[in-house]
Image: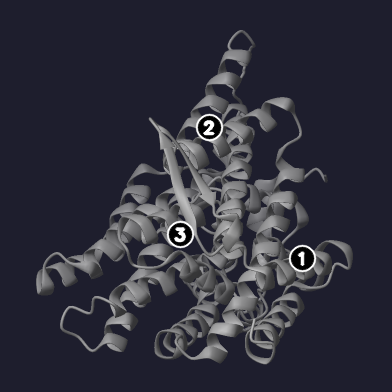
């Protein structure tokens, strides 16, 4: 590092350039090209903003990324919001975060229309059959990628194993797993450092403007809570309790507990949407994930599809497509409004969070637990993709999802193996694998009658 502090670099980076118009065009380009999940999206931002435009330094980019990793919600979208805020303040953050989400939201809404209107058509069913098999390979690849990064000690492996056993065999809620892992990591580090001098240190703040101010934070919190919940309050005033309120409250809660990215929370959302609310059938969650994988923007955009189908099937007196549109819009709103809140509220505290060893330990423990949760997602999806019939075996708090071997779907096995070989052996890009499996689904289901 140079002699400049990161705080000084943050102040110098946005001075004079770029213009708001140029920033708008650049984040529009990023939003349209943000395929490949968070890893691919972050890589695109790094290449454009750090390597090509040189609008932000490497250290500052990584510092912003580490802050976003501490937050619930899609870290790539929050990173875009943060950098937009750094360059142009509030309007820059709103612009960058919105452009990152908007293209994927529009495409996902269009795909939801097609799915709701034409999902009974055999060709559409065949396409989604193939996409499910590709998504299975993508999720398995995510388990391996996250595991390599997070499981660097026996303790981390143990946390991941406990998280998997807890959620898969005992139905422990995802938020409780995240909370427990974070507390465990925090307390373990605190106990280890208790006898040391300056055990928990924060990075120095060289500029008073970066220090947290309570009055400003209170205003930001109040304003964004109003933004977040005003649509829910308006719907309740007009219609009272119903599916829209259920959608709004459920996805508001999900937005608060989505530590570790979309893969970590998808199992929780799927279990609630399928088992608790009855909005979807198990296979339909896989269809939604397949659609989200093919669109730019955050993978968590799959929740828009869930909200669409929930309202489409329980329209409450509205035309079903209009109801679905309202459900999708409400879901998107309550999912991403909190992301802006976290950034605009937390940005002044970034420097005080840096160097906090106990918080870092809590994040590491959460990341390890996320590996176990994503593994649960992979197993859950695999069972529902490869077998036509499943049953739940339980004894006290223990429960297990058991497939019927006689209902093994051989075409799904064939496509899943092909997707895995393409992904892991030949390192073919995700979009090509998805397209190939969709075509394979058409061939197997239509041409061969499989």
What residue is rendered at 40% in x and 90% in y? 117
Q: Of 403 and 134, which appears nearest the observer?
A: 403
Residue 181, labelled with which disc? 2
Q: Is residue 25 above or below residue 40?
A: below
What residue is rendered at 42% in x and 54% in y? 271
Task: Work out which quarter of the rendered image holds the C terminus and state it.
Answer: bottom right
The quadrant holding residue 17 is bottom right
Task: Please name which of the two marks, 3 or 1, marks the residue nearer to the observer.
Answer: 1
The quadrant holding residue 222 is bottom left
Report whether residue 340 is seen. Answer: yes
Q: Of 102 and 221, which appears nearest the observer?
A: 102
Q: Mark 2 or 3 closer to N-term?
A: 2
Q: CA distance from mark 2 to mark 3?
A: 22 Å
Q: Is residue 131 above or below residue 379?
A: below
Name the element at disc 1: helix
Q: Dot 1: within a 10 Å radius of its alpha carbon, few (fewer than 14), some, or many (20 or more) residues?
A: some
Q: Is residue 160 above or below residue 130?
A: above
Write down the residue under mark 3: 339
In the picture as drawn, the residue positioned furthest to the right comes out as 426
Residue 153 place in picture, x, y as percent = 75, 29
The quadrant holding residue 150 is top right
Residue 43, labelled with which disc? none
Tell whether 375 sits left or right of 242. right
Residue 417, labelled with which disc? 1
In the picture as drawn, the residue positioned furthest to the front comes out as 406
């Amino acid at each position: 590092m140079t002699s400049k502090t990161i705080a000084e670099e943050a102040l110098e980076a946005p001075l004079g350039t770029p213009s708001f118009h140029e920033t708008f065009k650049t984040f529009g380009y990023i939003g349209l090209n943000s395929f490949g999940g968070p890893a691919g999206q972050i890589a695109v931002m790094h290449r454009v903003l750090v390597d090509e435009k040189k609008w932000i330094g490497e250290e500052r980019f990584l510092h912003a990324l580490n802050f976003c990793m501490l937050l619930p919600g899609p870290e790539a979208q929050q990173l875009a919001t943060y950098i937009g805020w750094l360059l142009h303040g509030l309007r820059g953050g709103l612009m960058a975060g919105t452009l990152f989400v908007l293209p994927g939201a529009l495409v996902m809404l269009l795909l939801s229309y097609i799915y709701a209107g034409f999902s009974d058509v055999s060709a559409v069913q065949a396409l989604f059959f193939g996409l499910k098999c590709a998504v299975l390979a993508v999720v398995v690849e995510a388990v391996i990628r996250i595991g390599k990064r997070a499981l660097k000690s026996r303790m981390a492996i143990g946390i991941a194993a406990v998280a998997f056993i807890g959620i898969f065999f005992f139905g422990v809620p995802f938020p409780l797993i995240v909370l427990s892992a974070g507390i465990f990591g925090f307390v373990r580090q605190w106990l280890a450092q208790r006898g040391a001098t300056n055990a928990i240190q924060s990075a120095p703040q060289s500029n008073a403007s970066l220090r947290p101010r309570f009055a400003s934070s209170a205003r930001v919190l109040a304003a964004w809570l109003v933004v977040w919940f005003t649509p829910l309050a308006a719907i309740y005033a007009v219609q009272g309790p119903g599916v829209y309120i259920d959608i709004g409250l459920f996805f508001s809660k999900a937005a608060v507990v989505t530590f570790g990215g979309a893969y970590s929370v998808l199992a929780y959302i799927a279990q609630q949407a399928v088992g608790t609310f009855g909005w979807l059938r198990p296979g339909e969650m896989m269809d939604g994930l397949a659609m989200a994988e093919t669109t730019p923007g955050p993978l968590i955009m799959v929740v828009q599809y869930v909200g669409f189908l929930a309202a489409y099937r329980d329209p409450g007196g509205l035309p079903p497509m209009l109801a679905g549109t309202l459900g999708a819009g409400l879901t998107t709103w309550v999912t991403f409004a909190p992301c802006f809140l976290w950034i605009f509220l937390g940005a002044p505290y970034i420097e005080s969070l840096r160097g906090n060893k106990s918080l870092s330990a809590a994040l590491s423990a959460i990341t390890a637990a996320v590996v176990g949760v994503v593994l649960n997602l992979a197993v859950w999806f695999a069972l529902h993709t490869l077998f036509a019939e499943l049953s739940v075996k339980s004894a006290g708090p223990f429960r297990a999802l058991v497939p019927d071997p006689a209902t093994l779907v051989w075409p799904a096995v064939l496509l899943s193996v092909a997707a895995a070989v393409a992904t892991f052996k030949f390192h073919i890009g995700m979009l090509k694998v998805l397209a190939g499996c969709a075509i394979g689904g058409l061939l197997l289901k239509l041409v061969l009658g499989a």
